[in-house]
Image (cartoon, helix red, strand yellow):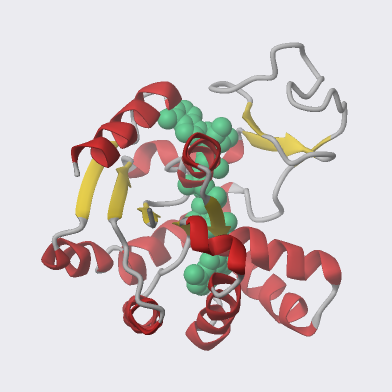
Amino acid sequence: MNVLLLGPPGAGKGTQAKRLEEAHDLVQLSTGDMLRAAVTSGSEIGKQAQVIIDRGELVSDGTMIAMIRERIQNPDCMKGFILDGFPRTTAQAVALDLMLSEMDRRLDHVIEIKLDDGVVVERITGRFSCANCGTGYHAKFKKPKRKGICDACGGSEFSRRKDDNAETVTSRLEAYHRQTAPLLPYYQASGALSGVNGMADIDEVTHQIESVLEAA
Ligand code: AP5
Ligand code: MG
């Protein structure tokens, strides 16, 4: 099963992708995570991407398409994948369709996680993650069970993304509406698009996504 999660910054794409990965034995393909790994490694792509990410703009289609093309051909993706953060432009969507058809594969579900613009800043500015294992949290909506201790690994160091500030979020949201939202009619036309209410709590969103997956 191959799934694409679409939605604005803070919609819960990463949160839900992690749950789907576990529940259905799929591979999460997060281009944001891949770019952050490239930044940390200090590679040339990482250096160029850092400036763009910090402005809340989109990295070039050529870079992103090449990155996904290489990753999606990895044997671990044969069991099925969840795309999180790609495609983000029409050019990326067209390239993905071509890539998948060359591999004789397709997207089984495209799920839009719908979120009102008004809550995006709160979602993003409250986010933090375990510096050791990467488990994601939120200061209000998903606190660690024991204050200051990661539920998953017991770590006590946490970090925040550099682009998680109110100013950059505004640009990211603009980029979403201008460049990524046009993919909704694109996937609507393909018949694969469903929507879930991203304003609901995390468990309820998971439940709605599972219903979509079961329905088909
Ligand atoms: P990326 O990392 O993809 O960021 P994004 O799209 O802005 O999305 P986020 O990761 O911020 O949000 P999310 O939907 O994953 O939410 P999460 O689950 O964490 O991209 C970063 C940058 O990389 C881009 O700006 C761009 O520069 C570049 N880039 C990446 N891909 C690209 C591409 N294809 N082309 C070009 N450039 C690209 O949840 C957020 C918080 O809310 C968490 O704290 C979570 O605990 C909490 N939460 C989640 N769900 C709920 C809920 N239902 N209720 C309450 N709280 C919730
Ligand atoms: Mg994410």
Mark yes or no: residue 123 visible: no
In the rendered structure, the answer to whether residue 110 lies left or right of residue 127 reads left
Which residue is depicted at the point 84% across and 69% down? 41
* Res 48 quadrant in image: bottom right
- Which quadrant would the C terminus be assigned to in this image? top left
Does 114 sit left or right of 33 as displayed?
A: left
Above/below status of 71 relative to 22: below
Residue at (64%, 20%) from the top-left corner?
143
| Nearer the observer, 151 or 163 | 151
Q: Where is residue 147 in the image (x, y as percent from the top left)?
A: 77, 14
Question: In the image, 23: left or right of 7?
Answer: right
Q: Residue at x 67, y 75 (%)?
A: 49
Q: Position of residue 113 (x, y in %)?
A: 33, 44
What x and y, as percent, mark residue 160?
A: 73, 43
Vertical placement of residue 111 versus 23, above or below:
below
* Horizontal and vertical percent position of residue 203: 42, 22
Question: From the viewer's perspective, is residue 113 above or below residue 27?
Answer: above
Whether residue 32 is visible here, answered yes or no, is: yes
At a point 29% along the width and 31% down the height, the residue shown is 208
